[in-house]
Amino acid sequence: MDGIRVGKRVIGTQAPVTVGWENIARVEGGPVKQFIFTWFQPTVLFALLAFWYYAPNSIAKASTAIGIGIGFKVLLLALEWVNPRYASWRLTWKELVTDLFYVGLGYTLLRIVDSYIGSEVAVKALQHSFHWDKFKCFTGLPLLVQAFLISFVFDFGQYWMHRGMHNWYPLWLPHSVHHYITQLNINKGAVGNPVELFLIGLGIGGFFDFVPRAFLLSGAFGMAIGTYQHINVRFNSPRWWRFLFNTTEHHSLHHSQDYEATRSNYAGSYIFIDRMFGTCIDGEAELLGMEGGRRMSIREQMTYPFTEGWKALKRRFGRPATSHPLAVPAE
């Protein structure tokens, strides 16, 4: 393949990719369908922000956010059957069972581990050493500005963590498992080695729990923007949306079978962070995964970073084989 030059890089030499919004397929159908799948994403974002802004304190709590999150994912799962981006990404029973295993892992084992050694524990330990009156300038900002800043700070950290996973081999080993997925759907964000899932969840969001309403609003930004990374739905996203926010198109390119394409679009929600640092590529890809789209079993996903890490250590530090001179028969 000749590939496509994007800046100083040539992408698409190893697997087919689409570059440029003008080359991406549009939603097919009548005016009602066109309208729904053009304005669905902005409508959900503004609706969630309005809910958390005006909701009474009796329901503005974390348990409500969890319930809304589950309901939103069920809705998106239905949309995957109504208007799939690619037929090859349609959810199968095998994929569904694998995804649900990882969703369950995230809500149980990983949550328990995080409660002992996660970022929230470190944040709570540090909070006692802060003088919170220094944050009066922050709490004096409009509520929506506070929420955006909390969301942005978290995503900015996620960008560098994710980029580091692609550029430092010890971090790449656990993250590489996530790049073996061969399709995108609503639960694929939960699929990965537990070490990577723990690392990617680290952040400093807990520092802002003293402004609970703004904290909940920041979660609305994440839910209504970042959720679309792993989803098999085709939208006609407005131009301003795809300029500011990460989309399925961006993230599918990041999961392409083409190496250069994967080194782009690291942000979780705000693709303009990638634009700031020159790592954004507007486009999409259908063929995903590594090693030609080889699918990993759950067992291999759990052990791969450790087995590959051990092999790398042996190659680097193992003793070279000594050559023995041929035996010469005695005279």
Image (cartoon, rainbow, N blue to C red):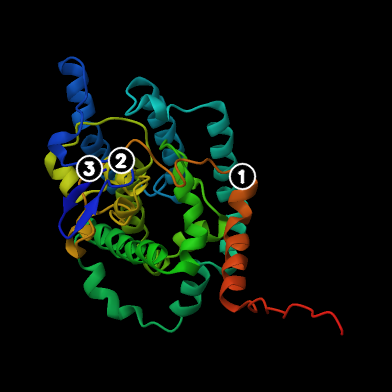
- The residue wearing badge 3 is 283
Q: Which residue type carries mark 3?
A: Gly
Q: Earlier in the sequence, mark 2 or mark 1?
A: 2
Mark 2 lies on a secondary structure that is helix
Give the residue at x 28% y 75%.
135
**Which residue position holds label 1?**
298
Left or right of 324, for residue 164? left
- Residue 291 percent location from the top left of the image: 47, 46
* Residue type (three-letter) at the residue carrying disc 2: Thr
Describe the element under mark 1 as helix, strand or loop.
Answer: helix
Q: Which badge, 3 or 2, comes first in the chain's sequence? A: 2
In the picture of the structure, the residue carrying the numbered disc 2 is: 248
Q: Nearer the viewer, residue 12 or 128?
A: 12
Left or right: where does residue 194 sit relative to residue 224? right
- Between label 2 and label 1, give the one nearer the viewer: 1
Which residue in the rendered view is the most extreme toward the right? 331
Residue 98 pos. (x, y %): 57, 38
Say if residue 210 shows up in the picture.
no
Q: Nearer the viewer, residue 216 or 136?
A: 216
The image shows residue 310 at horizontal and vertical percentages of: 62, 67
Q: Which mark is residue 180?
A: none
Q: Residue furthest top?
A: 30
Residue drawn at (12%, 41%) of the image? 239
